[in-house]
Amino acid sequence: MYNASDLRKNLKIQIDGDPYVVVDFSFVKPGKGQSLYRCKLKNMINGSQFERTYRSVDTFEPANLKEKKMQYLYKEDTKYCFMEAETYEQVYLTEDQVGDAKGFLSDNLDVEILFFGEEPLGITLPNFVDLTVTVAEPWAKGDSVTGKSKPIVVETGYSLQAPPFVEEGEKIRIDTRTGEYLTRVKE
Amino acid sequence: MMETAWSLTRKRSTLQIRAGMIRAIRRFFTDRDYLEVETPSRIPGPAPECHIDAIPSDGWYLHTSPELCMKRLLAAGYPRIFQITKCFRGKERGSRHIPEFTLLEWYEGGVNYIRMMEVCEELIVSVAHDLGHEGDITYRERQIAMHRPWERISVSEAFKRYSCVSMEESLKRGRFDEIMVREIEPRIGTEGPVFLYDYPVALGALARVKKMDPRVAERFELYMGGLELANAFSELTDAVEQRARFEEELKSRRASGREVYPMPEKFLAALPTMPESSGVALGVDRLAMIFTNSASIDDVVAFTPEDL
């Protein structure tokens, strides 16, 4: 059982028997007033969305989902293919089901695929992924101490802000929960 | 060589502005003969308020604001005092909330909340000036017109203008907070800062009831750039009424299964000698969000709880 204070982006809960994912979340509390939890929820089966504001007394059932460890293989048209390493079983997720995770999927990445019964519905990423920088402006020395940043792009096409010393071809670690740069990775 | 922590390095200019802002606040009050005070962070119990949860600390609690101790100083003959201190509130975490946050609180004897609106204006204009802002401020693509006086609108009028139910009706239905957040807050102060004033009595446990209209308490909130920045009261000085109001709050806490705090007896004992006065609590982190153009409170503190 979850409490309202457990609500956060990507939490999966069950409403009227269907699994829902929190796609947008904000905690609000007007001065001297009560805590309110504003959620945008998406039905993981049919994709329909709605907004609701919950109070701290509200409770939620966890979505009845099974997780299976699988590897990301490739993208074909708009489908993303994943494979279970031992059984070679393959499943496909749509672009919509993969969602923001698509910016962090590199070949052979180990992920958890979520199943509702036999049906694959979504994906849980590892907290950190290492990706290669494909686009970065050259480093103007001296910028690193001032905390300036520059935009870069990684192999998946995902763009983010990084320290000025990050160069093309380097591997960097990204926190998939925030989408932010963490550090360079030496291989 | 180890790479420095980028999440900290990139905050440098924000932390510099924040430090300058706190210097400017201190200068403002010191120049006006307010005494800077420090009161304990660990106290036997917070002021009993229904929706504010204190964090336990070895049998006592971390203060949720310095209000009780500062009012005891006020009652003991310190009529102009200010404090910048860390406060703690349990279970408050979001893009504008962090359980450990910095509060500026100041009190002045002999004035009411209307005068305190002017002091808020003077303070923020003065801090903006010290930080090099002349004229308007831009916060997240929003132009904030700084010329005084700032807009003032009563809560009751705001409900009339922006919501389909009246203030009284929303209270009766138990929907005041939801309507405030969904209908009113997004629509007020679109041009510049705005004071929302005269809140229902039940929502200002330490505020004086307005003589001309006993349904409301003399309380205001300052909003700026869509952020709720400061809360103020004409302080309640009647110990008997204050005790009754605290008992109401404790009753609500008990009814909703929340921790029930001890009655602050020493504060109540001091209240009869407290002069007519007004006090303001201003969120320093949120003010820093405005002056650094930051979307989240996480951006204006070096470390969040999640970083530790």
Image (cartoon, rainbow, N blue to C red):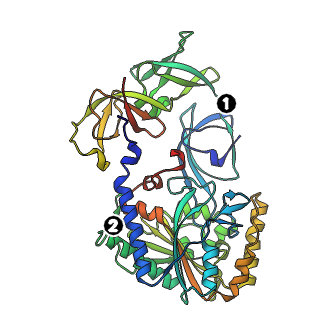
Residue at 40% over, 62% down = B18
Q: Nearer the viewer, residue B37 or B214?
A: B37
Residue A148 visible in this rendered orientation of the protein: no
In the rendering, which numbered label is found on residue B46? Answer: none
Name the side, left or right, on which B274 lies relative to A73.
Answer: right
Q: Nearer the viewer, mark 1 or mark 2?
A: 2
Residue at mark 2: B137
Please tell me whether mark 2 sits on a helix, a strand or a loop: strand
Callout 1 amino acid: Asn
Determine which quarter of the picture holds residue B98.
bottom right
- Residue B173 in percent (x, y) is at 69, 65
Residue at mark 1: A64
- Residue A45 in percent (x, y) is at 58, 30
Callout 2 amino acid: Ile
Name the side, left or right, on which A32 lies relative to B298.
Answer: right
State whether discs 1 and 2 lie on one chain: no
Q: Residues within 10 Å of mark 2 (few under 14, many from 20)?
A: some
* Chain of the residue on which disc 2 is drawn: B
